[in-house]
Amino acid sequence: MKQVVQNYKSGELALLDVPAPGCKPGGVLVRSAYSLISTGTELMKVSEAGMSMVGKARSRPDQVAKVMQSVATNGVPATYRKVMGKLDSYTPLGYSLCGVVEQVGDGIDDVAVGDLVACAGNEHALHAEVNWVPKNLYTPVPDGLAPRHAAFGTVGSIAMQGVRQGEPQLGEVALVIGLGLIGQLVVQLLAASGVRVVGADPDPARCELAERLGAAAAGDPASAAVEAAVAELTGGHGVDQVYLAAGGGSNQPVELAARLSRDRGRVVDIGKCSLDLPWNAYYEKELDVRFSRSYGPGRYDPSYELEGRDYPIGYVRWTERRNLACFLDLAARGSVDVEPLISHIADFDDAVETYRSLKDGELKAVAVLFRYPEHQGEEGETAAPAVTVPAVKLSGGASAPARVTKSPVRLAFVGAGNYATSMLLPHLTGRDGVDLSTVVTTTALSAANAKRKFGFAEATTDLDAVLGDKSIDAVFVVTRHSSHADLTKKALHAGKAVFVEKPLALAEDELADVLKAVEESGNDRLQVGFNRRFSPLLREAKKRFGARTGPASVRYLVNAGKLQHGSWYLRQGSEGTRFAGEGGHFIDTVSWLLDADPISVYALATPGNDDLQVALRYPDGSTATISYVTSGPASLPKETLDLVADGKALRLDDFVRASVYGSKRWVSSRLPKARDKGQEAELAAFVRAVRTGGPMPVPLTSLAATTAATLAVRTGLAGGAPVTLAGAE
């Protein structure tokens, strides 16, 4: 995904491709529709980044003090390395957005996939295509409120918290100094509270805008107009409250506040301005100076913001999240109008140029929004699917460096059943560069048999001992389906490369747990046994078919046949459905042929779910139908596939013969009993990746997308409607 970042040392702004965040418990993944540029706070950071080192120091004396303390504690060289390292790194921008919930983490029950939410937080509501947002930093958007308006939620909460600190009462008069984005919102909130407002700003256009939005009067603070308006509205007593929403180094705002306040008035600092209080003026009027801390109670409290611990409403009426919800409600009911504040809407791809225009003064703006490419329509009207599956995205955590090993690669097998002993181990036994180190089974005898037959150095029933053995490079998980996800998580956490036979998971929460393990461990060295894409025959057919220019149609018939009585595949309660167990093979094959991951799934079944029809849709308009049947005759080939596009066709006959039809026809030679479904080539690719530290044979995003699509078949059958794979690229 893309995200706006800045290097504070060099001042460089960039739109980087970065890993998408994972969906952790206690929060949701949100795909951005609109995000708001704070023309005050953010531009201040952008401007500071462009300063010299001396200028940066002058602008942040608090940080200079920390540096000096570090010098006293750690010495100059260590402090220098620490400071330069921190400065010379990318930092995010943004803290106010609206988007669509793409995935819901554990413990969240107040929103669902597809819901529109407003989000807050300078670590969670960033200018990025996808953000993970904890529970107390998002709130649902009321019906009827446009997404671009809901994107103002955070700055609206900042303004609202400032107004709450002023404790306005009906009939009072307030002065708002600084009519930028926050000041304009403060004006409207005060007016909605029954307070008469005077605004002060040197920009005539902003003064005019404030008057249109509810101010009784507004003018240049250096002129007599503001003082005259205050005198007229208050009978010469002075205003009840002053809200400092201005920035910069001038001390004029606090001096004006003292001059125009009534006796024992309240002065609330919202912005970041000079606060060299004139002692006599503030003392003689006994002015009450207050600070407004960002969005409200809960801000800067990790237990509230990150752990989701709310404050009891009886003790803390207005928290961050309640302020956010309140502002959106006011906007939805028309009590606050943010549309006139929108000076410019920029496409997210133009983010860097937009910041440059704002910084250089070419773009004069109160509020600027980024519009994201995934957002469909100005009002964010997207068709909600009847059923949705949580999006599968890679974690935002850094992947661990690939583990480069010396030859031979030491392998451990967890499980030694029929598939392992017939389809995998024969390709590994005696292979150059491979050392079959340990086999782990639940019974001692099966382990001993595998050791004897395939030449493992050791046989054991102790999985923990194998995972703790640092000499083992990779672990093969070839056990019953219900154990795959858990064993994969354990092996990833142990730092092993993992080859897990399909399926990777039997439920969405299991899949989420595996991806969470990737995030937590920093280990993404994972391969799922989707071997058909490695079939030499199919790869040759794809090569001869050539590149596509238009969408394709694919038909894949799988004659699965009846299961024998007593087969553990029939234990759906514990081992999942038969399609959940092996359907990923066929979805992965189609996705590899089309070079994309599916975006929706529609499934139909005969009574008893014996025969399935699974329709897949892909981003470029391609479609695929997988007929997974158990009622066919044994004499019918197990797998036949046809792909048609661009006036060409590819046909695969049960991995025995392949054909490509176009301007010229190509037909492979027919070799009886030569079915090669790719296991040997897949294992070779996996071993090579482990040995060299190169990329794994199949990207983790593709493995996850295929698993999600496979699981979506069950969801679709239950709901009787198409399933949108939320977050599919």
Image (spheres, helix red, strand yellow):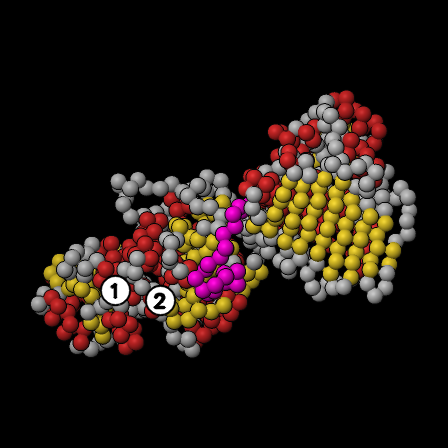
Q: Quadrant of the N terminus?
A: bottom right
- Residue situated furthest front in the rendering: 607
| Residue 7 in view (yes/no) | no
For label 1, the crowd category at 10 Å Cα-Cα, with few meaning under 14, some 14 to 19 and many 20 or more, is many
Q: Nearer the viewer, mark 2 or mark 1?
A: 2
Helix, strand or loop at label 2? It is helix
Q: Total marks drawn? A: 2
Label 1 belongs to which residue?
Answer: 187
| Main SS, magenta residues | loop
Name the residue rendered at 61%, 29% in the picture: 573
Helix, strand or loop at label 1? It is helix
Label 2 belongs to which residue?
Answer: 339
Q: Give whichever of discs 2 and 1 has the lower sequence position.
A: 1
**Amino acid type at mark 1:** Val
Figure check: 278 above or below 651: below
Segment colored magenta: 370-389
Q: Quadrant of the C terminus?
A: bottom right
